Image (tube, grey):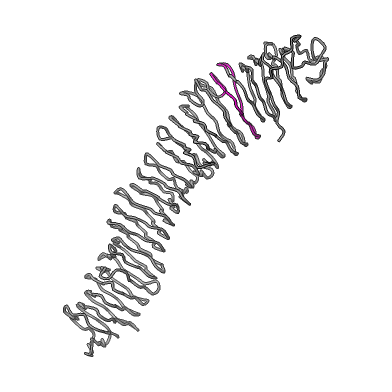
Amino acid sequence: MKFIAVTAALLVAANAISISWTGYGGDNQWTNRINWSPDQVPGTADDVTIGSGVVLVTIATGVNSLVMGTDFSAPANLTIYQQFFIGTGGLQVSGNGNLFINAGSASVTGTVTIGGNLFFQSGQISGQWTVNNRGVADLSGAAQKVLTGAQFVSQASSFIASGVIADLSGAAQKVLTGAQFVSQASSFIASRGVADLSGAAQKVLTGAQFVSQASSFIASGVIALNQSSQIIVQSALTLSGDVSIQAQDSTSVLLDTSAGTLTYTGSGVFQIQAPINVGTFNYQGGNITIFDDVAFVNPFVIPSGSYVATVGNAVANLTAGVSGAGVLSAAGSVLLLGNTTVNVLNVVGGNVSFDKVGSDVSVLTVSGGITKVNNAVSAKQLNLLSGTVQGAATVSAAQLYVSSQGFGLNAALTVSSTASVGGLISFGSAGSLTLQSTASFSTLASVTFTGVPGRTVTNNGVLNAISPVVFNNINLAGSGSANVQSTLSFQTAVLTQNSVTLSGAGVLKGANTNLSIAKVKSTPTVNAVIGSYSFTCPGECDSVSTSTTPTSAFTFSA
């Protein structure tokens, strides 16, 4: 990139003269002496006036002082394309003046006062810049703007004004390096102004504190924070499209809207890559990906068609509550949940905890990580694929689907309608599975229940063993029934059921197991072996019991 330097130099000669723009040369060029009165091109020692006209600076040059826009009949437009020096006399842009800085490094050590319009399209500025209560500063456009060692004081319409606009929009990077923004009105610190940080590209705050009380503060693109920079929103902030809040270093950067309202309008992805505190959150659409620490002070709603996902090292605090028809996905380090009533919750990894009562999820899928139920959770559909569910509270599901090579259950799980299970479930010391009287259990593939000895599956409904089912150190209790078309086997357990019905190649067998079954049924007969005792029952064997002494081995077959 080519940089222009607009610099206030301290080079003022004793024989400075006053030169005014006439434009008689007709080519708008600063370098044409015919455009000036007297007939000479201004230099760094001269005091220059441009009352009106169009002036193009295409060479490196400078003046001692410059006043422009004083003619009420027509505007004065000065565009700087090359290095430009301003001496101690300073630069005064009056009400009918338009100063364009396009591609460069502007450094002013004197005084620059904007009472007209400043259009900072690209380049660098430094020194003392003041926008008075009638001025406007426009920093929009696609290129980079750099403030180096600058003091930018706005009392009105450029960056800060009562009821006017401070515009940092545009597609490219805005860099504040060693800069001081002093606000006495409405854009950065304001009550009725507007702050615009929209545009597709990066905005960088370096060691800055940005406080907004503006009536409208909008942003998009990339906003990068470093050197302990903070954006504090005390009114409203609106984000739209693809927007990313990024931390560029390990310092304590922060976007804090806890005292205001954050709105995300959607039409893209909002990426949270820096710590954020959120107060009122108006989530209208689009998707959100959380990479860093975020805390929501108030409940919020995930709209239909949208998702919120935590990834990587994200620590997300949603204990204020989250609801809506959208999707919440957890793959970050920590997700703390309050009252959660979303349509879909996917636990992919990390640690997810339910820390408040009242959570009711339409579809809850656990495919990794640790899910902690410190308070009761209910789901219409519960899918357990991998990972662990643990805690002192109960998970209740209307429908349960398990397909896992090793799912850890260390909490109480209750099913009221259907359970479709395949794979291995390992019970922890607090783990249990209860099928209510309205529930039916069916095997998708071979099923093994194992884990801490003495934990229990309570079947008060119907267990359909279409594929082999193994209870290894895990009890089967309850007042329900089991229909066995494959193998139902027990090792070092207690088996208590109202009835077991064998059909086809169905076999009930085991060892070191205490039996208490009201009926074992098969058509036409039941062939039984308990220990060394063999017998046949026509149709059913009643009151199958080993009292309190586990049998060394047993088999019932059709």
At 31% from the left edge and 79% from the top edge, which residue is drawn?
489
Q: In this view, does 141 lie above or below 384?
A: above
**Magenta span covers which residues?**
132-158
Instruction: Answer with left or right where residue 270 lies relative to residue 92.
Output: left
Magenta stretch: includes residue 139: yes
Give x and y (percent) for residue 82: 74, 27
Give x and y (percent) for residue 443: 37, 72
At 52% from the left edge and 21% from the top edge, which residue is drawn?
161
Q: In which quarter of the image is residue 154?
A: top right
Q: Quadrant of residue 118?
A: top right
Q: Quadrant of the C terminus?
A: bottom left
Give x and y (percent) for residue 102: 69, 28
Q: Nearer the viewer, residue 208 or 539?
A: 208
Q: Nearer the viewer, residue 251 or 187?
A: 251
Q: In this view, does 470 lie above or below 139?
A: below
Magenta stretch: includes residue 367: no
Q: In which quarter of the image is the N terminus?
A: top right
